[in-house]
Amino acid sequence: MFKINDDFILGEDMWYIILGLITAIYLLTNILQIGLFGSIFGSYILRPIIWIFLAIITYIIARYEEINILYFKKIRKWDIGRNPFEAALLIGGFQISILIIVGLFVGFGESPYSHSMLGIITNLFFIISLLFGIELSRSYFVKKGTTKRGNVTLILGLMAILFMLIQISPLEFTVLNFSEPITSIKFIGERIIPLLAMSLFASYLAYVGGAISAIGYMGILKIFEWFSPVLPDLDWALAALIGTIAPAIGFLIIQNSIESTLPKAKKIRRKAKTKDPTIGWTIVAIISVIMVFFTFGYFGVQPTVIYSGSMQPVVDIGDIVIISDVSTDSIKEGDIIQFKNTNISIPILHRVYKIDEKGDTKLFITKGDANNDPDTDPIISNQIMGKAIFTIPKIGWIPITMKSLVGKIGINL
């Protein structure tokens, strides 16, 4: 027990108070968003006050539990910056640089936030209170939970999920719907994946350098988002890619910096004894985002699963064919193309049997290798989705089987 005065005594384990406060704040600002909390006064005065209250309570509890949550260094020397805070600022700046560079190609849009003097002051008050409330409590849980080396994986993962969830309103989750998978994938790609990646990196920064380091990284990103008059006009896929890859690169940079400053004997011991799982999580997150981009054709190629045997023996049922987005002028007789047919809902993959011209319009006559006759309807350029460049045998049976099973239980994909 820790005694503050004769009337107020803190117990040795008070983490549940902080967790309870976080839950209460989430309920007040989201689920119970009525009355004052739904007004401008509630949004820019009351909310900051309760976040500041959380930060103060967290600091008091941490102090009397003798936990240093603001700033500490596991490693004395850094290759990037002079300390964890500078490293966090540099990596946050690196992420902003990527956003700006991408914005030069895709364009910029006007910021939704106010840039009047009053707007800047109220937004700054809101951001500072939010950052200190979230990052001090994050650092408290991380520092308290990682006293044992074996708990690092679990604690960093839990904190990443917890502080990702409190940034998403419950109403946003209503878009998750099995009947509209594209909408669900966009929500996951645009909101959940980047927020989870940044939250995981902030938790790692809290682990190696305390709350100030996490504030440095998240703070510079918030400042750019709230105070820049223009922001990159990114679609959900690019937002997911940058929001995932930038923290992943930041983690690898810091991990590399730590490894390079360890004495040789410690490096060998660390390598032999432990493997930091965050690298694995990072790789899985990047691969997941890349797979989403690949599936939706953002890399210029797109996979398609073959459901019919009209192209046997060259392409069989259950094969996956990689389709490349090419100019129709480059398509020749004998090429296998994917195209849309107005009479059939799914795309068709057939070989170009013959190319005719009618005035200025090219007509592509197609035929399945297993069919006796060419297709009755010629194809024009705007119906062509791409040309087959590669076939992966039998892998498509996995989604075919899954779709069949899902269909049997009454879920229509």
Image: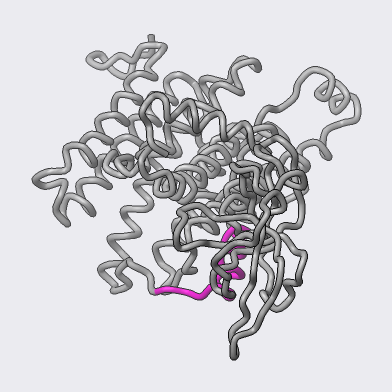
Determine which quarter of the picture holds residue 19. top left
Against 388, residue 161 (above or below) is above
| Residue located farthest toward the bottom when viewing the structure as drawn | 359
Whether the magenta-drawn stretch holds residue 140 is answered as no
Front position in the image: 240 or 150: 240
* Residue 114 horizontal side relative to residue 282, left or right: left
Give the x, y percent position of residue 317. 66, 39
Residue at x-position 23% and y-position 40%: 30
* Residue 47 horizontal side relative to residue 381, left or right: left
Does residue 45 appear in this view?
Answer: yes
| Residue located farthest toward the front when viewing the structure as drawn | 372
Does residue 84 appear in this view?
Answer: no
The quadrant of the rendering that contains the C terminus is top left
Whether the magenta-drawn stretch holds residue 108 is answered as yes
Q: In the image, which residues are magenta?
A: 93-109
Against 12, residue 381 (above or below) is below
* Residue 168 horizontal side relative to residue 368, left or right: left
Secondary structure mainly formed by the magenta segment: helix
Give the x, y percent position of residue 199. 51, 40
| Residue located farthest toward the left when viewing the structure as drawn | 35
Residue at x-position 58% and y-position 55%: 348
